Every structure is written in structure tokens, then in C-alpha cells.
Amino acid sequence: MMARMIPDNGPRGTESKGERDIYTIFKAELPDDYVVIHSLPWLCSAVNRVDPKAKPTGEIDFLIIHPEKGLLVLEVKSGEYGVKNNQFVHLHKQYSIDAIGQTRNNVHGIAKWLGSDPLLRFRIGYGFVFPDSDFAGKPTTPGMYDTTSTPAQPLYIDHREMLNVTERVVKLMDYWKTTLGNFDLGAARVARLIEFLTPEIDGRRGWTSRIFFDNKDWLQLSEEQSTVVTRVLKNQTSLVTGWPGTGKTLIVIEIARRLAAQKNKVLVISFNNKLTDYVRTQLVDSKGCDVVTWHGLCGQARNALGRISEAGKEDEWYRQQCELDLKDAIDQGRMADYSALLVDESQALLPSWCETLTNWFHNKPKAFFCDETQVFPYERGNIPLKGLSELLNADPFPLTIIMRMPKAVTGILEEVVPPKLQHSTPRTLEHDTAVEIISADPCKEASQIRKKLIDSGVPPEDIVILIARFIPKQYIEYLVRERPHCEAITKFRGLEAPIILILGAELLDTAELFSAYSRATSKCIAIYNAASYSWSGKEAFRSRLKSLPNHQATLQEEKNKLRIDNIVARSTERKSLKLSSLNIFWAESWRAWFIEADEDQSLVKMWIAYLAHKLPQPIFFWPKDSNTRFYFAKLNPSSADSADSPNSYLTQSLVFYPCKECGDLTPHADIIKTICKLCETEVDRTPYPDSSVIDEIRIMDGLISGELAKDRIRDLQPNLPLNIAAAASLFRAQRNKMRSNVLKVQLPAGRRFYLIAFIFVQVRVATSKPGSVMDINALADEIYGRFNVLTSISSAEWRKIFANAAGTFYSKGYIKKISKGFYSPVEDDQAPVPKRYRPDGNEEAREDSDIQEGDLINIASKESEGDHSEAAPESILGQGF
């Protein structure tokens, strides 16, 4: 191993051949516990105390550091030198140098410099190398030769010792450690010293300073905005409109201040409680300004009238009666006499509310400010810009200079919602101010991002997490656990924060995302859950993300992580039984069975009905390539049908959560009160079954797949369970089918014999030759004679059940009626394709859609993490904990 050299790519900034040669020698010969710093500059005013004439700057040729031997300053003097009058004289250029004085100043200077850190106060040794000079082993000057040591110790290395320069340097370090009485440095102090001398500094601007300058540069009233203030003050009625970040609220505040300064009594109205609180805080020193929400104003009117709220009619008051109370109070002269009206976020008001305000302030100065891009989906009937313009009889004055938002955020918003006017922004484009993340673990992503920002010096209160009104349990758990400053986006309209982190961006619609992105003054981070059902929709922000090549790859990569087979592979190993008709695996650490269902779900359903009675261990199953659907099969205690019925088991939908007891990600039931299914079934999770059980399963597989000997199949057939008989028919139909569409029809709800008849009719329709005629009664009799278990009902009953099943396929359009009891199959070009298989429904939509009737399960619970959201508790909204 070689010494650590700094810089590591060779000596720089020197023309000295001696320094270059010694650098190469040290790098090759010194062991790896040495650190060698070449050409170390230093600056220290304290050196004046050592030599008042000395400059407070210096440069050391080499500083050698070792955890046990300490520090050595090494000066290299290339060229031929002689000694005269205790001074070194360059023999060719005839100048003299004070090598010892220079070196001592360097040593004392750097020692003082390091001493600013109490842990770096060292006594430092020094030495000299004259690679081109030969002093014949004689003492040169008193400061370079210690005659008191035994043996005498020269502090220089000349040409004759250059072959052993590394060895001599090590001995010099040993000498100085003894002479100075130094203790070992130790690895920790060496590391601290290296960091002090050669710090690694990321020179990029940190978010703390960026936020400071953004607040100073972009959040103050600009010259252009001040011009708008003057314009509004000159007009009796004004309508100002503009995108987020154009300064509408800033302008409202400045207008209110100027009006109040002129002794006017000003009413400032907004819709949002938090925005109103902010504006009120900004105007606290402006006497004569009343800042209220619309409903706060109406509440004042109600109180002035002496009216009280009626229990159970709160919603009616907020929507209708509030306005009537205000009108009555105005008509009766019970409201304050205001000189001017300012309305911010007026797009959130109803037309009649705006009309009441304009009538109240008839012939008085009034100004309405609005942003029609920020109307949320649940806000129905709000006044549009055109309606407000007509009401006020004023043309909208558009603000087009976006100051508050980062330019990268503005670019995204303009791409998603193209503006009607051309915007401009004086801000520089910085791509890291708008970050969009698609993640399989959004809560972990949010936690790491927030921690990194806080660790870098960003105050926690400068980071606001915005969420939807209804969020999944995993988001609630994260917010309760970490207690960040969190707000619902619908209550944060009109407000701003230096850093906005949108958690659950996949849950928001375009208007909500537009508002959320635009709340940031320095950085916006939107985190989308890769597992969300919403990726198959047409929402504008998500459509844009999906269209970007890098996000397409990321989305697919993150979704792959969430595939059920990948999740279980990370949790437990599995061993296939290698059956021909079923993908079944034994999970050793879970002591449970896994079934990965292929497209032929009816066949799998028959298998599960059989295995649920045969295997004592839990059975978990999922559709192949599924990201969301993972199920547990359990016997149906309420089923009156026999064990061979497809309805003899129930299915429970599960989601994956960490389990403290299991120490891993495991399937959980009951989305409200999560219960680990492995813990719940611990008693049932017994070791691998006896070989006789597995042998019997293999026999059934051979029968279904046809790999068992024909004679053996004939022997077993009469006493087969009906679900195995149906599975065998389905398996062979897939291999011998004449038409495909009919086989895509999934099992409906029904009783045992009807479901079995349904499958046999389905198989016969799929495999009959084109143009053939099916005699339904003859087919029913044929099957009735094959299986002994059917004799539990009469042949007439079976015929009736079989005919009902055939009628189902007739009504669906897969067979056509020739005459009573006689049918002919409909070919695929005429037969319908089940909805879930149509070309206009993409695979992604099918994966994320609701469970379809007959999807290999008998539904016990349909809940899943993706479709279960709760209202965000008030305890996690507002200020951080």
C-alpha cells in the first residue's frame, strides 16, 4: 500500500525537480498510514509575534503526518548549495538563504494556525532536503545538527542520502517525537487535522442562503407591482387577475396600507382562513383595516342582528343563509361604515355574494383580485372571471410577471395549463427548484428529503407538506410519526412557503396540483406514489410525467418493485412444486403456500377450492404481475355446498405492512385495524406436508394436464371431485380450443352444480367444431354419467341446471339457438369479448380496476390500501408538532 498523497494526482504549482522527485518517492515508499501534503499554504497573523518582520503568509513544501510519529515539516532546497557564515549560498546564482529562519517561521506559523482548534495544538518537528547538495556528513549550521543526541542527529538530508530519503524521514520523525515529548496523535486527530488542512467543501449554494435571497429578491413589492397599486388607487372599480406568484396579495396589502394611511376605513375580504390571518398580520400596524373572511363578515352580521345558529343547519348557513344575514344587516345599517373594499381570492366566492358586496360598496372604491386557475373541483357555482367582469363593469387587468415562484415551477405549470397570456419571470431557471419524484415508498422519500434539508440548515418551519383532504393510512401514520408542518392544499390556497413538499401528489386533481406547485417560493418537491391507481387516468400532471422518457422508465421500475411476486421474493424464499396446471410454491420461512394465477382464473379457482380442503397450511394467491391484489384463501364455514364446490372457500384481501413480531413486510388483514396474517395463522403454519399429501396433489395435476396414463385417468374419473373434473376440462379446452372469447368469461356467482355446469358448457362451446350443433340434454346426460357425485341429484335436475348454464351463454352471445335445446357456437369474430379483455381497456387499467365478478375469488373483503383513504386528522394539520 502507498501513502495517502494530497494532492493525489502529482505535485502541482512547482518547478522544483527536487519536490517532484521526492513526491514520487514518498508515494511509492511510505506505508499507507502516512499522509503527505505537498505545497501547503497558510495564513496566520500570529506569526508576527515570532518575527515582527515576517509576512503572515507562508508555504510548506511537505507536511508529513503519522498517527504515532506526529508531524514533520520538510523543506526542499533544489540546486547546489554551500555553507558560508552560517548561511546557505546558492553556488551558481550566488544568493544566500536563511533556511532555518524561514522554516522555523513556517513551523511556528502553522502551529499557531492549527492552534485555533484546541484539539489541533501540536508541537511540530522540521527537516531539510538538499537533493543536489553534498555536505559530506558535516554539521552545516547549529540549527541543522543536534550534537547533543546520541548518536548526533542531522536535521538535513543531502544528495548522498537520497537513496534512503524515506528511511531518513521516518528517523527524523522519531527524533522529533522524543525530543518534543509528543504523545501519539491517534487516528481521530489525524482525520480532524486532514479535514482542517484540506477541507472538502461543496461550493454550491445551500438552500438556507437560497431561501434568504429569494425572500429578499422576489417577495418584496416590485416596481411593476407598485405601478398596479397606483392604478387601482386611481380607479373607482378594479378587477385584477393573474396567475399564482404575480403578487396579487402583495398588491392588496399595499393598497390597504396606503388607503389606511389616508384615514380611510378599509374592509379586506378573503375566503381562506389562513390567508386572512396572514393578511391581517401584515396590516396589524395599519389602523382602520378590518381583515375578515367572507363567512367571518357574515358571522358579524348575524351577531349584529342578534341571530343564533340553528343546530343541524350549519351547512345551509354557510351556503345560503350567510348572505341573507349580511344583506339584512346592511339594510338595517348594522354594519360598519367602510370607505373602500378589497377582495382577494374572489374566484372562491359565489356570484350572489359578489353582487351583495358590490351593491354595498356602490359608489365607493372597490377592487377584486382573482385567479381563475385556482378553483377546486368541489367548488361549484363560483363566479367566473367573465361574470365578475360583467358584475363590476370593469375589464380584467392581467398581471403577467411571475415573481414569487421559481422559474422551473412556472415552466411546469405553463406546460400543464397553457396560459391565455404570455408570462415573463425575472428569475433564473434553476432545475433543482422543481423536483418530481415517482416512488414505491413515498413516505420514506419524504422523510429522507425533509431530514436532508433540515440537516443542511433549513428551518423545519420553512418546509410545508401539502396533502389531499383524504389520504391513505400510510400517509397518516407517517405524518403522526414525524409531525412535520402539514397543511391540506385546499386550506393553503393563496399562501406560500419557501419549500413545498407535496405528499400524495397522485391523489390530487389538476387544479389542486396547480395550486400546490405554485405555493413554493424557493423549491417544490412533488412525490407521486408509483402504486397509485390514478396513473391509468388522464389527469394532466400525471399524463405529463408519464410522457417523459425518464419518468416512464422510473414509473415502470418503481411499479416493478411493487409487484406481488417481487414483494414476496424479498420476504421469503419459495420452492415450486413444478405442477403442469398450477403455479404453486412452498414458502419455507412463512410455512405457507403461494399460488400465482395465470390468465385462466376459473381453473385456478377450481384448484384453490380443492387445495383449501387438502392442505393444512395457509394459502396465499395473487394474479400474475399484479401490483395490488394479494389474497388469503380460507374455508367458508357458512357454505352449505360440498368440499368440491368452487364456493367452499372465501377470499380475504390483504395489504403489506411491516410487522414488529415478524420483523419483516408481511400481509395484513383489516385495513382499519391491521392484523398480520402470519401472526394470526401461526398455529396453522405447520411444516411441509407429508409426502402422501403432495403425491395426491401431483396425481390430480397429472389428471388435469393429461400427463397421467389414460387408463389411470379412466379409473379415477368416476370418483373425482367436481372441481378437479372442471379444472381438467378447462385445461384441455385451452389446448384444443376452436374459439377463445368464450373461455375469457369468468365464473359468475352461483351454487355448486350450476358453476360446474357452467364450466362444462363453456368448454364444449370453446371446443366444438365450426357449425356443429350441441344437443344440451345429450351433453348433460353424458357428463351426468361420468361422475358419481352427480347422482346426489336426479338427472332431470341436472338437465335443468345444465340448460340454465347454456342459457347464460346464449344470452351473452356465445351460442345461437337452432331450436329448443339445440345450439351452435358463435365464432370469435361475432362473439363478444368480455369487457376486461377489450383492446380499449389497457392492461394498466385492468390491474388497477375493481375486482371483477368471478375473478378467481369468493369475495370476503374488497378493501385494499389503494382505495381506502381517510380524512386527514386535524391533529396533523397546521403547525408541526
Image (tube, rainbow, N blue to C red):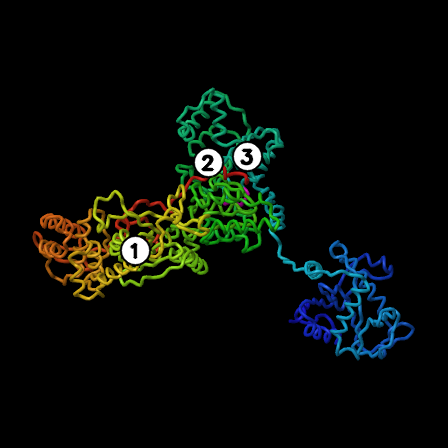
Is disc 3 placed on a helix, strand or loop?
helix
Residue 832 horizontal side relative to residue 368, left or right = left
Q: Is residue 286 above or below residue 505?
A: above
Which of the two residues, 55 or 433, is positioned nearer the viewer here? 55
Residue 650 horizontal side relative to residue 253, left or right = left
Q: Quadrant of residue 766?
A: bottom left
Q: Where is residue 430 in the image (x, y as percent from the top left)?
A: 56, 55
Q: Is residue 296 above or below residue 585?
A: above
- Mark 2 vs mark 1, CA separation in Å: 49 Å
The amino acid marked with disc number 3 is Asp
Residue 290 horizontal side relative to residue 54, left or right = left
Q: Position of residue 422 (x, y in %)?
A: 49, 51
Q: Quadrant of residue 561?
A: bottom left
Residue, disc 3? 277
Residue, disc 2? 393
Task: Specify start and end residues of the magenta stretch as a single range.
Answer: 243-247
Is disc 2 placed on a helix, strand or loop?
loop
The amino acid marked with disc number 1 is Asp
Which of the two residues, 787 or 81, is positioned nearer the viewer here? 787
Residue, disc 1? 840
Q: Position of residue 224 (x, y in %)?
A: 58, 45
